[in-house]
Image: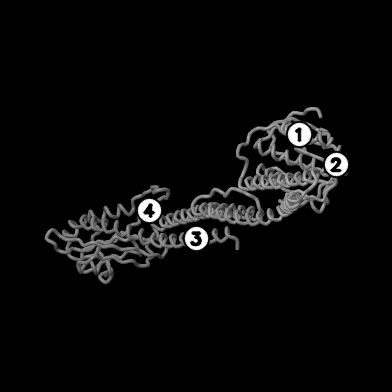
Amino acid sequence: MRLGLRVFFGFFLIAGLSSVILLRVVLGEVKPSVREVMEDIMVDTANLLAELATDDLAALPPGAPLDDTAFARRVRDYANRPVDVHIWGLRKQTLDFRIYVTDPRGRVIFDTVQGPGSAVGQDYSRWNDVARTLRGTYGARSTQDGYGGDVSPVMYVAAPVRSAQGELLGVVTVAKPVATVQRFIDRAERRIWAAGLGLLAVSLGIGVAVTWWVVGHVRRLRRYAQEVQMGQRQAPPKVPGELGELALAMDAMRERLDGRERMEHLARALTHELKSPLAALRGAGELLQDDLAPQDRQRFAAQVVAQSERMTELVERLLALSALELRRGPEHPRAVRLDQAVEQALAALNDRLQQRGMQVHWGRREALTLQADPELLALALSNLLSNAVDFSPPGGVLEVSVSRDTGFELRDHGPGVPAAAFDQLGQRFFSTARPGSLRKGSGLGLAIVRQIAGLHGWALRFAPAQPGLRVQLDVQGHFTQSSQTSP
């Protein structure tokens, strides 16, 4: 399973379980809490009614009904009172309290319910609300009853009626069906469910965002590692926290490994490349120790100078390539005219061109401006042109062009390069033999050009020509302005 799915499912599991547990706890507390509030209100109501009934009960003979008293008339008026109110969006059209009064023996002497359902005359002394109140404790009960419509739980709360001398005159009980507040409970549960599902949705949204954030940074690190594996030099991605520290650690490790590998490779390659000029120097030096004719001495001395220059050039190019490999991009980029840079590079090679009797033919020449490090661009163009001169026959022609379609393009008329060797061109110490000689170059010139192209985001391409080799420095996408000029 991919990392993103693992993180998301883990977050989803935690958030989902937390939401379900929270909803179960909250919903489990709603109904009991509503009943507790309802019971608290009924306690207040029962005690209030007990005070109101005190005078009427005290004036009645024992066991007489309470029907003709002011208390009874007012309570029945309450039961028959019309009401139509809206309580937080819910409509209430009935008054739901049932009120009955018992004498000190527990016999019902008043009930707001009239007709067949009336409890007047019945013995309620064994019901908890009456029995406990008669014993001087808090009396309440909850019973399945048909009062108020369908059979449902009905809560009963009682309060004692006492005279001024403390004599127990009777018990007032207030009853209310739980179903009358069920609408409020249902509405609260719906709102809680909606809030819980909304919270879950928000949690999942946050989970997706966190997963995307984490996985995005991890993928940046993976992409960076893959680019390093392919040999590309890229700056470590800027990511926060421990991932950023990991990126810096990976970059430091890559630098150390690259430096060690580079040094080992350079040491082996340099040792191999220096063998030939050192052998030539040793041979020439041994011969110069003997008595030689002046012309032979001059020839061997010239060979010593030539091989020394060859080693100097090799070391300088190797140092330049090593310095380029340590960079991550051009250090001083600015706007540069590509055609003018080519013209300056050709002017620097003018003496060599004249010495070999070579000519330069311009093809398309567009005034193209691009962002580049001027020194690196000049070094790349110089190496490309020098390489073309080395592989061109005396009296040959170099064809150059600068255009938006191809960037800088150069063609020589030398022996060319086998198609199988194109992929190796630009690698250090890979080269083919120069025309008329078995001596090979170091291959560092094209390696420097490829490194400079990589630093700028350009592409170095090779294609066969008949005869010769066509080299293209593709700088498309990096131009800032251009205007067509005549070839």
- Which is closer to the viewer, label 1 or label 4? 1
Residue at 34% across, 53% down: 80
Q: Earlier in the sequence, mark 2 or mark 4?
A: 4
Element type at mark 3:
helix
Res 79 visible: yes
Q: Is there a contact, CB below 8 Å, between mark 4 and mark 3?
A: no
Which amino acid type corresponds to the residue marked 3 in the rendered image? Gly
Residue 316 is drawn in which quadrant? top right
The numbered mark, 4 or 3, whose residue comes first in the sequence reads: 3
The answer to the question of whether label 2 and label 4 lie on touching residues, with beta carbons closer than 8 A, is: no
How far is mark 1 from mark 4, CA to CA? 105 Å
**Residue 176, x across and y down, in percent:** 34, 60
Question: Is the residue marked by circle 2 packed among few (<14), some (14-19), or many (20+) residues within 10 Å?
Answer: some
Amino acid type at image mark 4: Thr
Please say if 407 is above or below 148.
above
Q: Which mark is residue 393?
A: 2
